[in-house]
Amino acid sequence: MLALLASGSSRSSSNNKLAESENSAQNSNNMSWGTELWDQNENLAIHTNRGIDALDKFANFLRDRVAIETEYAGKLRRLVKNYQPKKKEEEDNEFTSVQAFRNLLKEVGDLAGQREVVSESLQLQIIAGVTLLSKTLREERKKCLSDGATLQQNLTTQLSSLDRAKRNYEKAYRDSEKAVDSYKRADMDLNLSRAEVERYKNVMTSKIQQSDDAKNEYANQLQKTNNLQQQHYSMLLPSVLNRLQELDEKRTRGFREFIVGAADVESSVAPIIARCMEGIVKAGESINEKEDTFKVIERYQSGFTPPRDIPFEDLSKCDPDSVQDSHYSNSTSNHLTIRGTMSANKLKKRVGIFNIFGSNKNSLTADGQKEDFSDLPPNQRRKKLQAKIAELTQNIAQETKARDGLMKMKIVYEANSSLGNPMTVEGQLNESEHKLEKLKVDLKKYQGFLEKASQVPTATSSPQASRNQLQNGHRTSRHSNGSADDHHDDGDDQPDDAGSLSSSSASPESGLGTSHTSLPGSGQGSANENAIGEDTYYETEVETLNPVGKCRALYPFEASSEGSIPMSEGEELQVIEIDQGDGWTRVRRENNSNGWDEGFVPTSYIEITLYA
């Protein structure tokens, strides 16, 4: 029961408040400054001035806020810039945590952009509007106060005229009364002559006339004053005061609109800021510790196996010198194995994996690594080579498109000489062909690197052990006549620099990417030279290839590098290996002196007919 009474009383009180607010609104619509505050001109002037000052204060508040927003956005951008990953840290971008942090920086940069939007919108929309409104209100207020002062001056002047007329009337009336009394006394004085009495009468008459005139002037001024005063307080002054009221209401209404507008500016960027927050949350949720762990393994895995147990060395049964050497070998093995596993990025100064691949010491990449990446562990080396091959393949595709475009342009120019001179494209076409041949040679070279890296078995104990094992073994090299012999590597341990792919000739004519001295059947070089300088890419035994077609030389070709053979225009040759994408075709010709000449010629110099 009490709850019902309480709820009923609360509803009644709320209804009463609503009714009171509606009544006050109706009363405020019916009330005006001109009628209610007709005598508060000075207070209204002070009030309107304070109101405009409050508007200016709000504008100053917005300016300070804009400065804070601009400074905040600038500091956020500097923060994002300072924490952007450095160039040396780009290799860590594959980790999800690093990617998440980069996405976080991007979202924070977007947040800074939104704060700049808020700052610019407040400056252009709100502050500019407030400043314009304040200036307009001050001008209107000044005009209203000037009009009010003019009206008050006119009323004051009229009141002064009325007061002056009243004083004149009072004086004239007193003078007339004195003149009447003087005449009466003179008229009763028998000692005065008739002329003197007549003079007093004339003075009396004049004074009475002056009093009547002053009275009429007073009455006239009084009527004018009453009319002006009635018009002043009923029409003129209320009009000015009502204008001040409209001015103040305009200021108040503008205050409301500008506050709401500032909130709208903030609200307009709220969805974007919310999306930035969602992006930050998404970036945090994208972090996968298992994936990062796998990438760490993938990056630093060397491919080596942990060292085997150190065998027991019985000093009574072993030569002390051999024991010392064995101990040194094991120490070196363990050291290299640890380096290959834990700090593969510091192996740039190593001669090469297992020291079995010859390399040119001057053939280094931009980051100081060897051209064939032989200073890296096996797994890392294969990944580097695969990335390099992918890069070269992409470059070849781009250069091929460029060459095809130049060829089409040349064909169009040849068909219609008015469009252009075909010779202007010839130089560019030759340069493109040169670049393309160079890229294909590099591609073949790195494919050879990758093939060798893939064929090398993973070390079972250490690089030094594998090296020693290879030194005690033998490898196969090819004779110039196409046969294969086994050669033991005797002598000191030194890299096979002469046979390295990295030290090969890179000229477009070679097409081989190697510096081996001869091809099978060419009759050039000797077995010993091949044993020393033969590239490991040709270590496997190769059988004599059967021809797959024939070709006719379209242009004469002078062999200027090892591995290529000359030919004359119109000469027919056997094709034993077609172009593998490097721009060179392997051919064979009959030679009366030693049987056959075999080598490479440019594919673009010959016309090929393949056997069915």
Image (cartoon, rainbow, N blue to C red):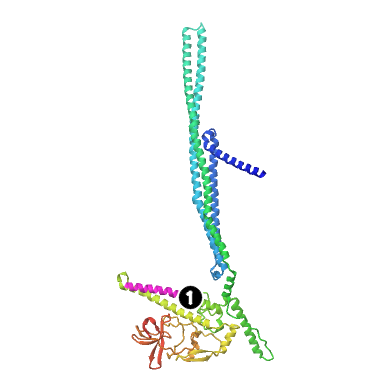
Residue at 53 percent across and 48 percent down: it is 260
Q: Where's residue 537, x and y in %?
A: 49, 84
- Give above or below for 581 relative to 231: below
Q: Where's residue 195, x and y in %?
A: 46, 8
In the image, residue 400 lies in the stretch drawn in magenta:
yes
Say left or right for 275 vs 608: right
Which quarter of the image is occupied by the C terminus?
Answer: bottom left
- Give above or below for 433 relative to 45: below
- Give above or below for 230 relative to 202: below
Crowd band around label 1 with a 10 angstrom C-alpha radius: few (<14), some (14–19), many (20+): few
Amino acid bearing label 1: Ala
**Nearest the eye: 69 or 294:** 294
Highlighted magenta segment, given as a residue range:
386-413
Single out the residue that lies furthest toward the top: 190
Which quarter of the image is occupied by the N terminus?
Answer: top right
Q: Which residue is mark 1?
A: 390
Task: Work out whether residue 379 can be spotted.
Answer: yes
How many badges with numbers are in the image?
Answer: 1
Residue at 65 percent across and 44 percent down: it is 4
Residue at 34 percent across and 73 percent down: it is 410
Say left or right for 561 vs 92: left
Q: Where's residue 312, x and y in %?
A: 67, 87
Say left or right for 218 vs 19: left
Task: Work out whether residue 37 can be spotted.
Answer: no
- Give above or below for 407 relative to 482: above
